[in-house]
Image (cartoon, rainbow, N blue to C red):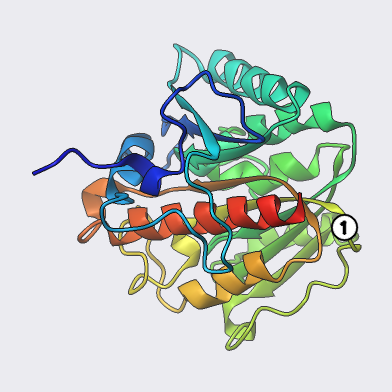
Amino acid sequence: MNDPIPFAGLPHPDPSQASPWVLLGIADDTQSTFLRGPAEAPSRIRSAYDGRCFNSTTETGIELEHALSDQGDLRPLQTWDASAEIYARTIEEICHAGQTPFVMGGDHAVTVPVLQGLAAIATSIHVIQVDAHPDLYPDFEGNPDSHACTAARLLEMTHVASVTQLGIRTLNQDQRLQVDHYADRLHILEARQLTSEVPRLGHIPERAAVYLTVDMDGFDPSVAPGVSHPVPGGLHSRQVMQLIQQGHWTLVGMDVVEVNPSRDINDQTSILAARLLHEGIGYAAGAR
């Protein structure tokens, strides 16, 4: 068998080649509460989205062959604080170079240092979170850096203007207290409210800076089985693809997290994660 063409041929073969869009893996699942495995996702996403099977053009007709700079994978250090500092600094450097980061996790905790690094763009950011879980615990079993606390940490950041959560279906009483606390900046559309297209999200201003974080367990397990925390009744791929393609904002970054290749079936979840990033890069390229 021929070697795979990574990520459908979007990355430039010369890693030093500058591009407005940067692909970055953060291969860290140290803050997972249940299973390990998402640390293996970045390399699996690249290889599963093989250019021999998938081409480099988006659904909307944006051609992205060799248009992407792949900066490889960051891996955890001895402590979370040390790791998070490196992750945030890398994102800062990407921003200072005038580039837009597209990140492959890792568990959902990696989104926190990514947003810390995005403070470098010096503008308020609206976060859209696709997820089965609200991740609003102040701490989880004593750990404030757990992937179960991601949204709580984002809402503490002064440059995060709002967090909009889509597909939630595990909101418990402990986290409802956080919903009340952040009522002016937190918007939740539970999965049971999203039986057709995702609405326009009119509370996000026209051309506002948006960061999209997609926890792959936000999808129904029939669509994305390769996750550590599958929850029935989730979103479908077309809903999230249309959310990306029909946005009215400026996409300043995006991640896909919580792919667990050891639980996947025929790379179904890895391929969907790659396709979402592909369409996100196409949206950013079309706006540019």
For mark 1, give the secondary structure: loop
The answer to whether residue 235 is visible is: no
Residue 208 horizontal/vertical position (percent): 87, 54
Q: Is residue 215 above or below residue 68?
A: below
- Identify the image quadrant of residue 162: bottom right
Please report the residue visible at 83 percent of the width from the left and 31 percent of the height from the top. 121
Residue 66 horizontal/vertical position (percent): 48, 39
Give, as a three-letter code, the residue at label 1.
Arg
Task: Give the residue furthest to the left.
Answer: 1
Left or right position of 192 against 104: right
Mark 1 = which residue? 207
> Considering depth in this image, is 102 or 1 the residue closer to the camera?
1
Please report the residue visible at 64 percent of the width from the left and 64 percent of the height from the top. 244
Please report the residue visible at 55 percent of the width from the left and 40 percent of the height from the top. 67
The answer to whether residue 33 is visible is: yes
Number of numbered discs:
1
Residue 188 horizontal/vertical position (percent): 72, 68
- Identify the image quadrant of residue 193: bottom right
Left or right position of 47 against 72: left
Q: Is residue 7 above or below residue 83?
A: below
How packed is label 1: few (under 14 Cα within 10 Å), some, or many (20 or more)?
few
Q: Is residue 51 above or below residue 200?
A: above
* Quadrant placement of the N terminus: top left
> Considering depth in this image, is 158 or 242 the residue closer to the camera?
242
Please report the residue visible at 33 percent of the width from the left and 74 percent of the height from the top. 222
Left or right position of 22 against 14: right
Left or right position of 1 against 177: left
